[in-house]
Image (cartoon, grey):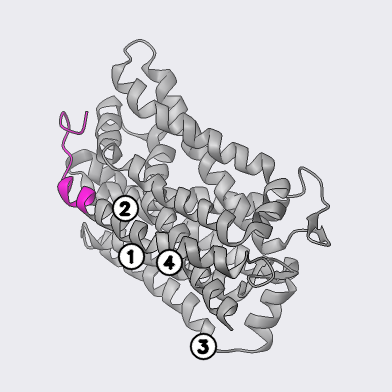
Amino acid sequence: MQVLDIAVIWAFIIGFGIIMYVLMDGFVLGVGILFPFAPDEEARDTMMNSVAPIWDGNGTWLVLGGAGLLAAFPRVYSIFLPALYIGVFLLLAGLIFRGISFEFRFKANTSRYLWNSAFAGGSMVAAFAQGAVVGTYIQGIETVDGVYVGGALDWLTPFTVLTGLGMLIGYSLLGTTWLILKTEGDLQHWARRLAIPLLGAVLAVFAIISVWTPFVDELVKERWFSNLSIIWVLPLLSLLCAVQIFRSVRQGRQTMPFAATMGLFITTYLGLLVSRWPYVVPPNYTLWDASSAYESQLFLLLGLLFVIPIVLTYTAWTYWVFRGKVRAGEGYH
């Protein structure tokens, strides 16, 4: 009973770390995806300045989730990494290119266009890789006796390509609403014009994935369609968030579009977790099957009781210090 309880606690901690990363770094990646389409170079400066003070701290949640997964559920690591070597490499390479572009772009003169491309390309690759990883998790991983037995490119299927594109579009919407919140003038108007078409694209991809998923995942088919239950509240909440995004953008509001987009991500994420619970390596292994020793989980959990509050406090303080609008000619750099 103790192992069950602490395994569930760790599952919630890692799940929390993942959604915090998606929300906190998602709009930064979204800004990068939108970078090539910005009106001019001054707009790109403002876009980058809106995320420059906070982007590196957001990666803390990715480290926390990854390290926690290795410590608490080592079997997940031993299966997922061989299955997703190329996808994870693309994710990390994209984040590296995105990261170095922040510093080099502001120092560059004649080569600035190269760093613009690195920032945009890195953001696009990282976002697509994240979506493809989610798609791989949904469609399941082929294992025998706890060992991955598939090929290096088994993760790349039409379904995972769609989920990767869906993440690209979703992050673009999150980045657009962030610019509505943080900028003003022509740049804010540009972002506001993009929000509604991007919302329509997100809903279209969401609908296609929802129809397709039962054909690649029997558990989802059984859980969502054979036994109608309260879990259908989650997609309804997602639709309500989408309606709120549409209304708030049309009404000229500045904070609500971003908050509602975050709500859209949260409800979609919860729907994914509910549909797969308690499987961490679908379709065979539950979180208890993949758990490390109880003593190991307990020891590391005591450490996280100190780390998580510090990370939350640092994150909140950073956003408070750099609150308000970012104007042309002003910013972190």
Q: Could you say whether the residue bearing mark 1 is in a helix, strand or loop?
A: helix
User: In the image, which disc is placed on residue 230?
Assistant: 3
Q: Do the residues bearing badges 2 and 4 touch, measured as CB atoms within 8 Å?
A: no
Which residue corresponds to the image point at 24% horizontal and 34% vertical from the top-left? 46
Residue 241 visible in rendering: yes
Q: Which residue is mark 1?
A: 260
Judge by depth and name the residue closer to the eye, 251 or 63.
63
In three-dimensional space, the C-alpha distance between marks 3 and 2, rounded to whole angstroms, equals 30 Å
3 or 2: mark nearer the eye: 3
Left or right placement of residue 251 versus residue 272 in this view: left
Judge by depth and name the residue closer to the eye, 294 or 114.
294
In this picture, is 222 found above or below 46? below
Q: Which residue is mark 4?
A: 266
Q: Earlier in the sequence, mark 1 or mark 2?
A: 2
Residue 224 found in image quarter: bottom right
Q: Could you say whether the residue bearing mark 2 is in a helix, strand or loop?
A: helix
Left or right placement of residue 36 versus residue 254 in this view: right
- Amino acid type for the residue under numbered disc 3: Ile
3 or 1: mark nearer the eye: 3
